[in-house]
Image: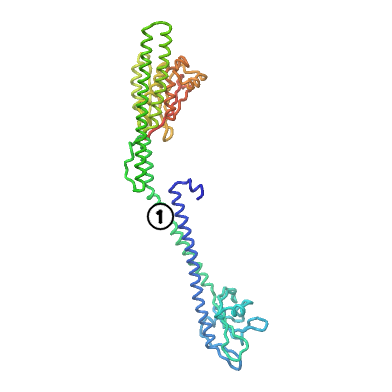
Amino acid sequence: MPSGLRRSSLARRLVLLALGWSFGALLVTAVLLAFLFERAAIRRVDETLNDLNANLLAYSTLEDGKVFAPAFTDERALRTFSGRYWEIAEPTADGKIVPVNGNLSHSLFDSVIPTPPDLMARLNASASKRIAYPARGPQNEPLRVRAQENWPFPNRKAPLIFLAAEDRSSVDRDVSNFIAATAIAFIVLGAGLVLAIVIQVRVGLRPLFDLRSEVAAVRRGKAQRLAETYPSELMPLAHELNALVAHNQQVVERQRTHVGNLAHALKTPISVMVTEASQRPGQLAEVVTRQAEAMQKQVDHHLRRARAAARTQGQGERTSVAEVLDELSRTLGRIFRDKGISIDWDADEELYFLGERQDLLEIAGNAVENACKWGKARVRIRADAVGPERFRLVVEDDGRGLPPERREEVLQRGTRLDETAPGSGLGLSIIDELARAYGGSLALSDSTLGGLRLEIDLPQAEA
């Protein structure tokens, strides 16, 4: 099978294969029908010519050593160049075929029925002493000629050749008309077959299309499992997919449990170290406290990343972007009330984040909090769909911004911004890590408001 056909869709493959066989069968059938029709038409002409030869043979007479043909009342044989001709001939010593005593039909006028040079050889080779061959008539019309060799009279040294010919123009015309009618009929039939095959394939493969849509709904968080009833051939696949979804959910839950256990296992010793160090003031205690706090931040950072990665490997969930932004704007508006920050947000009510609400709260919350902290009076938030599967969250402020040379450093370091780029806000590393865990990204640029612009690419769920 050609590689292109192997890579094509199943529907296209079935349609092409069915059309190939159907059109091949139609073509062979059309050619066979045209051939059979032509043979049947020529057979009818041959029967007429055989009857004419039989009458010539039966009613010819011999008088004074001369052969005389019977009188025919066939109007076509009497009318000049009518298309029906007969002739009684004999071979000469040099192999030519010539009429005997002018025994020709009146329709030939001053012509003779053409004969091939090897006529006698072909007649002698035929068991019935009868052959048929094509020729051109007195007016160059196509002829069907029947030749028959006989010795009907005694005391003749040379055989007699009885020739009967018929204009086959009407036969050729009938065959052409039949081929044209057959072609039109088969074209109509072929168009009907194309439509029927496409409909059949679409209807036959509909369960596969439905299965694909339901699997996509599960992946995008719109369904928990495959619930539709499918044909018996697809039900085992549906059951296996449900089992795979359930297994993935179990794996995610185990990962979350392990992450939680690790968090508790690490936080307790770190808390003990900080508590013990605080009770014993001194240079060593300060070093222990500082390093323990750094360890705690690193643990929180990597645990957060592990939890996000585990969630993205599990079943998709849908979170309303507008609801999260509305909640954040109200909460952070109260927190930064004394600063007089104005938070302006806009998002489509039908825009959904393909992930957990807590993750979107952490991503958007850190971005908006950073803008409120470093902005002067205004923060602008916009969320727009970018294609069917992604959306863009843009947060801008009117603060002093971040120098371009420090932006790449902040994202590469992936640590607390207070440590890597003083004065530019807190939480960018968290946003970057979570966005990457969801297959997205964080980009920093200058805002039209005068401060920093955060553009976050995230997966979009279907409404």
CA neighbours of label 1 inside 10 A, class few (<14), some (14 to 19), many (20+): few
Q: Residue furthest bottom?
A: 64
Q: Quadrant of residue 189?
A: bottom left
Q: Which is nearer the eye, 79 or 290?
A: 290
**Residue 419 picture location, percent across and down:** 46, 15
* Residue located beneath label 1 in the image: 196
Task: State whether residue 130 is above or below residue 322.
Answer: below
Q: Is residue 49 visible?
A: yes
Q: Quadrant of residue 431?
A: top left
Q: Residue furthest right?
A: 94
Q: Please say which color scheme the image uses.
A: rainbow
Name which residue lies at 40% across and 51% down: 201
Q: Secondary structure at mark 1?
A: helix
**Residue 137 picture location, percent across and down:** 59, 76
Task: State whether residue 183 is above or below residue 302.
Answer: below
**Residue 368 picture location, percent across and down:** 39, 21
**Residue 423 picture location, percent across and down:** 45, 14
Q: Quadrant of the C terminus?
A: top left
Q: Which is nearer the eye, 204 or 135?
A: 204
Q: Amino acid at mark 1?
A: Ala
Q: Is residue 85 visible?
A: no
